[in-house]
Amino acid sequence: MAVPKRKVSKARRDKRRSNNSKLTAPELVRCSNPECNEMVRPHHVCPACGYYGGKQVIVKKTKEAKG
């Protein structure tokens, strides 16, 4: 059975474990709707206007004035 020859120092152990903190945020791209121009995740429908790939795939309700 394999047994470590030397004790692993705390610094070396912690350096190995710290790789989880190096995760990056998802990239953002501009919406394909020229009127919207919101930042969205790639290959996702724009939550603001419902456009994907230059076409409207979800019909969004517009805010109507209450009164």
Image (tube, grey):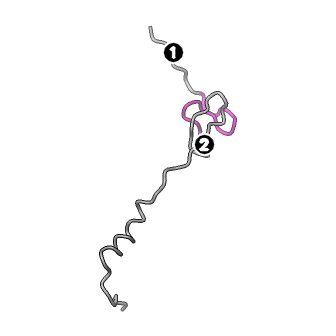
Residue type pointed to by label 2? Val
Q: Which mark is residue 24?
A: none
Q: Secondary structure at mark 1?
A: loop
Pointer 2 local density, CA inside 10 Å: few below 14, some 14–19, many at least 20: few
Q: Point out the tag, 1 or 2, that comes first from the N-terminus.
A: 2
Identify the residue under disc 1.
Answer: 64
**Left or right: 2, with 24 as reference point:** left
Pointer 1 local density, CA inside 10 Å: few below 14, some 14–19, many at least 20: few
**Left or right: 21, with 30 as reference point:** left
Tell me where the magenta segment starts and ends, as one range. Answer: 44-59
Q: Residue at x 61, y 29 (%)?
A: 36
Quadrant where the C terminus sits is top left
Q: Residue at x 46, y 57 (%)?
A: 23
Where is residue 25 drawn, in percent x and y? 49, 50
Q: Quadrant of residue 53?
A: top right
Q: Main secondary structure of the magenta part?
A: loop
Q: How many marks?
A: 2
* Magenta-drawn stretch contains 55: yes
Q: Which mark is residue 29?
A: 2
Q: Residue at x 66, y 32 (%)?
A: 33
* Magenta-drawn stretch contains 57: yes
Residue type pointed to by label 1? Glu
Q: Secondary structure at mark 2?
A: strand
Where is residue 49 drawn, in percent x and y? 59, 30
* 44 lies above or below 47: below
Q: Quadrant of residue 61?
A: top right
Spatial CA span between label 1 and label 2: 29 Å
